[in-house]
Each structure stands twice: as structure tokens, then as C-alpha cells.
Image: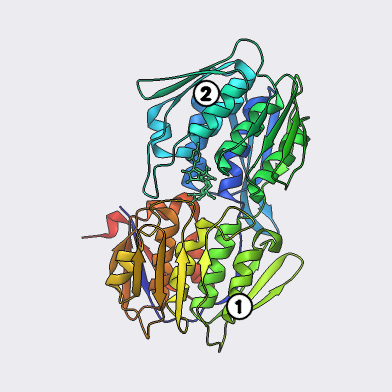
Amino acid sequence: MDKIKIIGGKKLEGKIFISGAKNAALPLICASLLTDETVTLTNMPMLSDIKAMNALMEQLGTQIDEFNDFVDGHPTKTYSYRTPKATSLVAPYDYVRKMRASYYVLGPLLARYGKCELSLPGGCAIGARPMDIHLSSLEQMGASIEIKNGYVNAKIDGRLKGAKITFRTVSVGATCNLLMAATLAEGTTILENSAMEPEIGDLANLLNDMGAKISGIGTPVLTIEGVEKLHGATHKVIADRIEAGSYAVAAAITRGKIELVNAQEPTLSRPLQILRDMGVGIEVKENSIIVDARGKELVGKDIMTEPFPGFPTDLQAQFLVLMLTAKGASMVTETIFENRFMHVPELLRMGANINVHGHASAIVRGVDKLSGAQVMATDLRASFALILAGLIAEGETIVNRVYHLDRGYEKLEEKLKGVGAQIERIKEADEE
Ligand code: EPZ
């Protein structure tokens, strides 16, 4: 398995192009299952999770064309998806096991074909992550759901029926699945306590461009007037706010200055406010954000993860590492997932001062230095947190299990090298 080697101590300065958002792209791909016409997605990130989703789509009978493209002079991918008629309505274990977001095929397949068999995703490194909200909400729309042999068998005679659904917890995944399902339902669906993450707005905008009738975008109440048929559309994927936030921390933690090209401030208000409160300079431009921490002494701040517009759980690990370089103590509270401090034991091995209390909170105290070590993380964002620690640690840090990073950070070493980091990938074959 590939590793990443970093020699710490470089101040990062320059520009980083922010790619299209993974967590927007994954449901957008599945939305193409709702029509027999072509859905074209531009500004797609080149990530292993996108490849995994494309493989699942092909197994369902989707024809995919891939094109090299450019956004603001940067190479990206454009993909066209066309599913005249699905050849399978089954999302098998081997696909779902590799990527939970495979469950986004459930809403569209059920809505268009009246049937879907989905391998039930298990828990993962960050928590139990059940699907009960997706399933009980689809039942409220008339679907009959049975769980057998590890699979969800969902069926409906005729069309799904519009319903008023109040999610018991804010869920990004359930909001996306139900939004897609409701577009082709008979009658009106109201989704209360919906997630408001920007990726959901992106999905709703594509669906409306395909002929859906969704209102309330960007609010917790989405109203969907069902239509009989959707058509093709072309859509540009929004910029990845979590990638942007991760590189903002790279600038702050090395006391450097990075311009995040393509990053969108409204999707990052809370994390940027925390950076400002810590003492980092933030300049918002029309199509970029400049993060400037040169010569700054930062002070610790408390953060608590919450659904959007609150502080994102997907930036918790990165900000926790940043707090290690700030003056004083910071309390980091995780409210979304029950097991999202798995990066802490690895950081302790590098000399961090962090006390985790139960599963929900950690006290982080500023330290004079971290020292390089061999480390590994169990999920994508925690892996990036270790990269950040490596950027400031004395000596050499080797981050193992790089496949986590390849799921969600496009051209990670290239982007960090471009702003002055001493970083390289050690390919498995290069090792002795
Ligand atoms: C999405 O996961 C993201 N994944 C996650 O990003 C992100 O951390 C998460 O939203 C929160 O923002 C994708 O977009 C592909 P949820 P999702 O449903 O949809 C509980 C990353 O690093 N819940 O909003 O699975 C759940 O257990 C990943 O890119 C139920 O109890 O998250 C959690 O505690 C990691 N029952 C909370 O709700 C359900 O049926 C929020 O989860 C569904 C969720």
C-alpha cells in the first residue's frame, strides 16, 4: 500500500485550486438514474470514490462517457451518464462495502423502477451510521421494505406517494435519498428537518434543471411536487468546501499564506469565522479565499460540530490539529458521529497534548513542537489531519493507508508540493 512521506517545517505559500466536491458529486451521479436522457456533470473531481460510484452505475446498466476538461485553466473531468433502462436493480455487497454512498441509488431506482435491492451498509470507522431514517421515510411514501440476508429489499406497486416527513435527526444522506425519490412521486412531499448542507442545494438545483419541482432549497423544509418524468441536464459540481477548509488549515498551521482558488465563502462561513477568531487573516475575493497566517500568534478556540451551517464534522480532525499550535486550551466537541477521535492516539505519538473525554469531547493544549513518526488513520479526514501534523512536525512523518486520502483529496501531494511542502508518495513497488 502507498505511503506519504513528509518532512515538516515548511511554510506554505501560493495558490491551490479547489476541486469539485466529492460529497456533491456522489448523489449527483445517482440522480442521473431518474431519467433515460443524458446527465452531464462537469468539474468532477478525480477520486477513487468517484471511480467506485461509476463502477456501481455501470453494473446497473448506465452508459458513462468520460472527457478531459478544464475549469479556470485547471484540468478536471466531465462525465456523461445515460441509463435508457437499468439492467439491474441490485447494489451488491462488494460495492456498498467499499463505499457507503452507494446507498444513493436506492431513492432513484425505487422511484423510477419501483424496486431496489441494496446491500445494507455496516458501521464504519467513525460510527454505527444506520440507515433507519432513509428506510422509514421511504415507507411513509408507500414503499414496502424488508431486510433479509444483509440486503434491503424495497418495493412499491406503481409510484411512490407524496408524504409529509419529519426527519428525527438531520441527515445528509436521508435528505438526498428522499429528495431524489420524491421528484417522481405522485403528489407533493414535504421534508421537514432536512439537512441544509450546500451539497443538498447542489443536488436540488440539478434535479430542478432535470424538470423536478423543488422549493425551499437552502432551508430545512423542502417541498417537492412530484412529476411523471425527468429529462437530461448539464451541471457544474460545486467546489469542495471540506477540501478548501483542509487547505485553509494547512496555510494556518504552517503560518503561511494560501489562496484557495474556486472556494466559496458561503459554504465555509463557520470554519472561516473560527480561523479569524484564532487570529488568522481571511480575505474573501469573488472566486477565491486568501488565508494568511504569516507572522501570527494564534489563540485556541472551542469548536463543536453541528449540521450546516454549524461547524462541519468533516473538518473537526483538521482543526483539532491546528489547535495544537495555538496558545491556551481548546475544547473540541463532536456531536455528529460517536467515534470520530481516532486520529488522537496517533497525534499523541507525535507529541500532542490532547485529553479525550468519553466519545464526545477533547481538550487540546498548544505544544511547542510535534515530532515526526510513522502514523496511520482509519478514515479520510483523520488521515488529512495527520498530513497536517506532518507538515509542522520536526523530521520525517510517514502516513500509512494512503487509500483513505485518495478517496477524497484530488492530487494531494501535487497541490501541497505546489505551495512548498516537502511531500512525496512512496509507491508500494518503491519499497524494499
Ligand atoms: C454525509 O454522511 C457525508 N458523506 C459525511 O462525509 C459527513 O461526515 C456527514 O454527511 C455529516 O456531514 C457523504 O456525503 C457521502 P448523516 P451521511 O446521514 O449522509 C445518523 C466524509 O469524510 N443517522 O448526515 O452518512 C448518523 O449515524 C464523510 O466525506 C441515523 O441515525 O451522514 C449520524 O450520527 C464521512 N440514521 C448522523 O445521523 C440514518 O438513517 C448524521 O449522519 C441516517 C443517519
Give coordinates of residue 110: x percent, y percent. Answer: 58, 21
Residue at the far left in the pictured view: 432
Q: Residues within 10 Å of mark 2 (few under 14, many from 20)?
A: many
Please say if 201 is above or below 131.
below
Label 1 CB, ligand 1: below 8 Å? Answer: no
Compare residues 167 and 85 and report the one nearer the observer.
Answer: 167
Quadrant placement of the C terminus: bottom left
Give coordinates of residue 239: x percent, y percent. Answer: 65, 55
For disc 2, the marked residue is 60
The kind of secondary structure element at disc 2 is helix
Kindly identify the residue that appears in the image at 47 percent across and 81 percent down: 326
Please say if 248 is above or below 170.
below
Is 4 displayed left or right of 220 in the figure? left
Label 2 CB, ligand 1: below 8 Å? Answer: no
Q: Closer to us: mark 2 or mark 1?
A: 1
Give coordinates of residue 377: x percent, y percent. Answer: 34, 58
Give coordinates of residue 396: x percent, y percent. Answer: 31, 75
Please say if 121 is above or below 43.
above
For disc 1, the marked residue is 277
Q: Do the CB atoms of the residues marked 2 and 1 lie less than 8 Å apart?
A: no
Kindly identify the residue that appears in the image at 40 percent across and 60 percent down: 383
Residue at the far bottom in the pictured view: 295
- Residue 24 seen in the figure: yes
Quadrant hosting residue 257: bottom right
Q: Which amino acid does label 1 sit on?
A: Asp
Q: How crowded is mark 1: few (under 14 residues within 10 Å), some or many (20 or more)?
A: some
Q: What residue type is labelled 2?
A: Leu
